[in-house]
Image (spheres, rainbow, N blue to C red):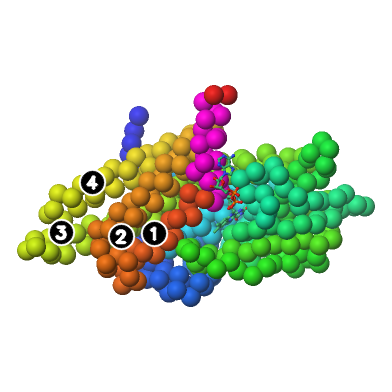
Amino acid sequence: MDFRLTDVQLQVEEMVRSLSRKEFAPRAAQVDDEGRYPAENHRRLAELGLLGMLFPASFGGAEAGPVSYAIALREVAGGCASTGVGMAVTNMTGEAIFRFGTDAQRRRYLPMLSAGNGAGAFALTEPGAGSDAGGLSTSAREEGDGYVLDGSKAFITNGANACVTIVMAVTRKSPRTISAFLVEPGIPGFSIGKSEHKMGIRGSDTVSLSFEECRVPKSSMLGAPGEGLKIALSALDGGRIGIASQAIGIARSALSTATEYARDRRQFGQAIGEFQAIQWKLADAATELDAGQMLVFRAAFLKEKNLPYSKEASMAKLFATEAGNRVCHTALQVLGGYGYVREYPVERHLRDIRVTTIYEGTSEIQRLVISRALCG
Ligand SMILES: Cc1cc2nc3c(=O)[nH]c(=O)nc-3n(C[C@H](O)[C@H](O)[C@H](O)COP(=O)(O)OP(=O)(O)OC[C@H]3O[C@@H](n4cnc5c(N)ncnc54)[C@H](O)[C@@H]3O)c2cc1C
């Protein structure tokens, strides 16, 4: 066993950390305040090859592997969580198209995604179907040489800025069959709702989508008929490593601010970092984050070696996002009143990290996945 990162992984870490600290972090408060999608950050990610990290160079990707990807996402999220989630969903979309798409679909969409000519989006959730992904009601009826989509999707990240959206829809009621479709913006019958007003990751683009008699060609189906749920669940397995990394990145930034503050802030004639109560908070937070990071690396390593990793990805997401939330709470407490106001970034980190225990499967759903793997 070797806990050291490879030279290439270290280079990715250094490059992305520097990008995120110099360019993303300084704009993050403004992006949050204005609830503005940071298109300029998306372009920078593309320039550095960070939007196609999980597919090969022959399709414009960087094929950096899941471990490097986890590191890159952690660093981006540490600077700007909104940019991090946009990057995560674009990479997840590209990887799914690479794994399940035809050659024509790969050639059409993957170079666009990696060049940043639009983001990637993944539309599973509906107003009436969240955790219960199989309970979708959006339908795709076969008609002539295509399918006709009807229904709506909720909370879709990158939905308004996507060049392609993977849409899961019911293609047969009995036996119930779900298929996946690649949908481009601007086609008749496809419309994008208003942006959600969110607590955190306020610069990320989260919209509803609706389909009314929306006709797509048969060639837009991703994978075979009936493979939609399999594609969605397999994309989510990989996506969960990403969300766990996002949480570690956000919480590390919060802890770093809290540690610096504890050194500088003086009360009762000494630095607050000299009180054991504060020291223990920081020690517990650092230990929890390292434990989360280990789980993330284990899941990413298994994925990189093409070994089963679904349970491990859920464990990483469950632990890293719950621990990350605790760490952000702790960090805010260390800053006292200054943690609660916008002078410091910690209140934003706390708002940004909150959603990580919810999207791509809530903590309760991760426990279901883990316990099913244990009990069979
Ligand atoms: C900012 C944001 C971005 C998102 N981006 C996307 C996206 O890009 N694409 C997409 O498809 N979706 C996206 N989502 C949706 C997200 O994945 C869902 O919100 C999530 O899966 C939970 O579904 P729900 O909100 O309908 O909650 P529900 O499923 O209604 O759950 C409500 C509560 O009940 C619990 N619960 C439900 N079932 C069980 C059970 N069997 N056992 C125990 N507890 C249970 C849940 O854990 C939760 O606490 C996004 C959501 C947000 C907030």
Category of crowding for the residue at label 2, using alpha-carbon neighbours closer than 10 angstroms: few (below 14), some (14–19), many (at least 20):
many
Along the polypeptide, which appears first: circle 1 or circle 3?
A: 3
Secondary structure under tag 3 reads helix
Q: Quadrant of residue 5?
A: top left
Q: Which mark is residue 350?
A: 1
Tell me which secondary structure the magenta stretch mostly adopts.
helix
| Residue 330 falls left or right of residue 260 | right
Along the polypeptide, which appears first: circle 3 or circle 2?
A: 3
What residue is disc 2 on?
Answer: 332
Up-down: is 291 above or below 183? Answer: above
Are circles 2 and 1 on residues that touch, CB within 8 Å? yes
What residue is disc 4 on?
Answer: 283
Q: Is residue 80 something one can see in this rendering?
A: yes
Query: Considering depth in this image, is 287 or 101 the residue closer to the camera?
Result: 287
Up-down: is 130 above or below 337? Answer: above
Q: Residue furthest right?
A: 144
Magenta-highlighted residues: 359-374
Along the polypeptide, which appears first: circle 4 or circle 1?
A: 4
What's under tag 1, amino acid-wise? Leu
**Mark 4 CB lies closer than 8 A to ligand 1:** no
| Residue 370 on the magenta segment | yes
**Mark 3 CB lies closer than 8 A to ligand 1:** no
Q: CA distance from mark 3 to mark 2?
A: 14 Å
Q: Residue furthest top?
A: 375
What's under tag 4, amino acid-wise? Ala
Q: CA distance from mark 4 to mark 1?
A: 19 Å
